[in-house]
């Protein structure tokens, strides 16, 4: 692992996004609450929060980060068609929550897939990416659109 003991503990934030592409009929069933396993987006939100907390257990050289907030938002995108997952993770630590934000977005996307796979095996998870970060020595960064 990279040593971080000399770094200052500061507020930090990272945001990530993932897209889940699916059939339009699957998206409609998510919107209407017609998926047999339950409320897809509510379960995906909980999974994202839990996933962010498990990041250092799953990524071998990832430092544990003291997470102070996790926010997960979903956008229904008819043009995709599918769901866009945006996750924002805040922490107060010596390193940023970049991996925790990526894990949150990915875990939400995988949960959406799992809950809908019985009706749409052709779904794809795509474009998992860091969209922004703030704090620390390197300061802020935002992905260009």
Image (cartoon, rainbow, N blue to C red):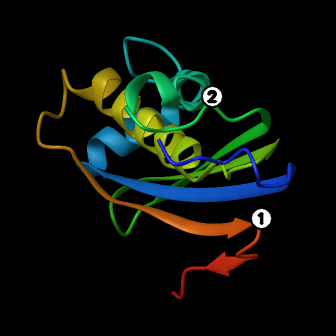
Left or right, 126 with respect to 43, comes to left
CA gap between label 1 and label 2 equals 23 Å
- Residue at image location 19% in from the left, 27% down from the top: 119
Q: Earlier in the sequence, mark 1 or mark 2?
A: 2
* Image height of 94 relative to 45, above or below: below
Label 2: few (<14), some (14–19) or many (≥20) C-alpha neighbours in 10 Å: many
Instruction: Decide: is 110 above or below 12.
Output: above
**Residue 91 position by quadrant:** top right
Q: Depth check: give the residue in front, 18 or 50.
A: 50
Residue 49: mark: 2
Q: Secondary structure at mark 2?
A: helix
Q: In the rendered image, is residue 33 in sight? A: no
* Secondary structure of residue under mark 1: loop
Query: Residue 112, located in which quarter of the rendered image?
Result: top left
Residue 4 vertical placement versus 126 (above, below): above
Residue 51 drawn at (x, y percent): 52, 27
Side of 118 relative to 43 (left or right): left
Residue identifier under label 1: 136
> Which of 46 and 23 lies nearest the eye of the viewer?
46
Determine contact: label 1, label 2, CB under 8 Å. Answer: no
């Amino acid at each position: 692992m990279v040593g971080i003991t000399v770094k200052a503990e500061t507020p930090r934030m990272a945001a990530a996004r993932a897209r889940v592409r699916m059939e339009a009929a699957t998206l409609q069933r998510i919107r209407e609450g017609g998926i047999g396993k339950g409320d897809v987006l509510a379960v995906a939100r909980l999974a994202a929060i839990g996933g962010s907390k498990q990041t250092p257990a799953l990524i071998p050289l990832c430092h544990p980060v003291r997470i102070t907030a996790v926010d997960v938002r979903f956008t229904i995108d008819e043009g995709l068609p599918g769901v866009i997952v945006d996750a924002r993770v805040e922490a107060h630590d010596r390193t940023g929550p970049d991996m925790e934000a990526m894990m949150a977005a990915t875990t939400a996307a995988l949960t959406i897939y799992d809950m809908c796979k019985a009706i749409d095996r052709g779904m794809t998870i795509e474009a998992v990416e860091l969209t922004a970060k703030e704090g620390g020595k390197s300061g802020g960064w935002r992905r260009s659109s």
